[in-house]
Image (tube, rainbow, N blue to C red):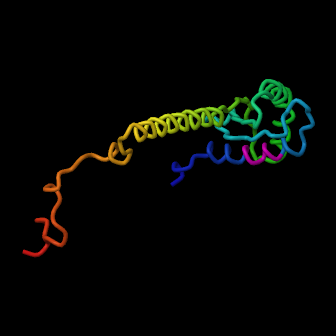
Amino acid sequence: MANDYPRSYRVADHIQRELAGIIRLQVKDPRISEMLTIAAVEVSRDLSVARVYYSLLDSAEQKQTQQGLERSAGFLRKKLSDVLSMRAVPALRFYYDDSVERGNEMSALIDAAVQSNTTAAESGAESGADSDDAAMPKTKQNDLPPEGSDDGHSTNP
């Protein structure tokens, strides 16, 4: 049971919650964007290093925010030591999480592919072919069982 959720995971969750509040309420560095979100925290097995992943609403502020977070790492670690009941607080390393941007790019690619597929189907409909018939495979009338008849898969002997 204890190995299902190791201590490093519990510490990481606690650091994530506390760090979000400290950054929002106590850090006064103007380089740190107000639209910062702590996406995830990973703590090493020996609890010496915490990798803090953050995301921003505006990726143009990423470089300034990274500098601000690195500059305030000591302050954040001190504030975490006041809240965490640990002998040593992990060193904080900050990493920009661009998964939201990549997700938006993938969504745009999917939308473009669907749009190009839709326009291809519409152009086929304009040339005289029915788009529903083009998408559906052709079946022979003999392949379908007559309505109301036994299709050969009865459950009764």
Answer left or right for 154 relative to 125: left
The total of numbered circles placed on residues is 0
Residue 120 at x, y percent in the picture = 45, 35
Quarter of the C terminus within the rendering: bottom left
Q: Residue 25: x, y in percent?
A: 89, 46
Residue extending furthest left? 157
Q: Position of residue 46 (x, y in %)?
A: 63, 35
Q: Residue at x 75, y 30 (%)?
A: 59
Task: Tell me the magenta residue range.
Answer: 15-21
**Please, is residue 16 above or below residue 59 in the view?**
below
Left or right: where 148 falls relative to 102: left
Front-most of 24 and 83? 24
Q: Nearer the viewer, residue 38 or 150?
A: 150
Q: In the picture provided, is 122 more to the left or to the right than 28?
A: left
Instruction: Find residue 109 and report its horizontal and vertical position in percent.
Output: 55, 33
Left or right: residue 105 versus residue 28 is: left
Is residue 15 shown above or below 67?
below
